[in-house]
Amino acid sequence: MKNRPSPIQNRIALSVVAFAFVLFGSCANPSSPVSTEASLYSVDFSSSPTGWYTGTSSDLYCTAAMTGTAYTLTETGNDEFQTYTAPYGYSPYAGKIAVPYGVQSNMGATLNNGATFGTSVIKFNRTDSQNFSLLSIDQSSGQYRISQYAADSWVAPDPVPWTTSVLIHPTGTNTIKIIQHANSLDLYINGSLANSYSISPPAGTITVGVGVENFDTGTTGSESVTATFTDFTIYSEPN
C-alpha cells in the first residue's frame, strides 16, 4: 500500500495544543449515543466469520489473520498502512450504506520488535480504492486523527489533526464508534462522545472496514505493528 506522509514532527506541536484543550475543558457532551439505531452487519471475530480477507497483502508487508479470538492485521513495512473492507452481500448489509450510518469496533494496537509508533484504524466513507477516510487511534500517545485520501492522494491538512483524548486506554482495546450524519461526524471513545466534526460523507456507494498503520522509521526492518479487532458492527442511524 502507498506510503503515508510521516506525522511525527507535527504531533509534537499538536500534542501541546491538544493538552491545553484537555486541561481547560471541552464543550463535547460526554454521554453515550441514544438512538433507535439498527444493526446492519455485526460480527464477533471469536467465531472466525467468513468473508474477511486473511493472508499476506500484495506488497508482502501486511498479514491478516483470524486468531480464534480476534481479527489481526500485522504491518511490517516502515511508514506503511493497510486496510481491508468489511465483506458485504450479507442481508441486510448489501454493501451500500445510506447516511446516516455508524461503525463500531473494539480494537487496539501493539508495537512489536522495537516499533514506537503505530495505530489501529477504522476505514469509513470509502467509495473506491482512491477515495476514503481513516480514523486512527494511537494508544501510546493517547491521540486520534482523521485523515482523508481523495483522488489518489492524501488531503492536506488532515480533516482532524492528531488530538489528545483522556478517553483512550493506553493498553488493551478501546471501543471506538463513529456516526456519520449528513453534515457532521460524531466520534465516541469507550462510550463517551469525544467530539463532533464538520465532516460530510461523499456521494456514491459507501463501504467501511478496518486497518493498521506502522509509522515507525526504524532501520532494522523487524519493527511491526499489530492491530487487533474483537468485533465489528455497522449501523443504520436515525435521521
Image (cartoon, rainbow, N blue to C red):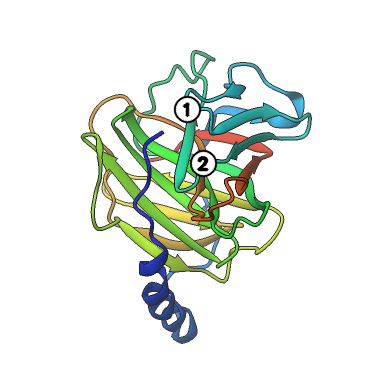
Q: Is residue 21 left or right of residue 183?
A: right
Asked if residue 94 is positioned above or below residue 32 in the image, the reply reads: above
Q: Is residue 35 visible?
A: no
| Farthest residue, direction right | 68
**Residue highlighted by disc 1:** 59
Residue 220, visible in the rendered structure: yes
Residue type, numbered disc 1: Asp
List the single residue furthest toward the front.
Answer: 220
Type of amino acid at the residue the image marks with label 2: Gly
> Element at badge 2?
loop
Residue 93 in picture, x, y percent from top left: 48, 20
**Residue 75 coordinates in the image, percent (x, y):** 56, 40
The secondary structure type at the circle numbered 1 is loop
Q: Quadrant of the N terminus?
A: top left
Number of the label disc, if any, that sits on residue 105: none
Looking at the rendering, in which quadrant would you find the C terminus? top left
Say how many tags the image has. Answer: 2
Q: Residue 216, percent across and down?
A: 51, 54
Question: Does residue 87 lie above or below 149 as drawn?
Answer: above
Q: CA distance from mark 1 to mark 2?
A: 9 Å
Residue positioned 64% across, 40% down in the render: 229
Residue 70's quadrant in the figure?
A: top right
Any mark on residue 77, and which? 2
Name the one closer to the observer, 52 or 234: 52
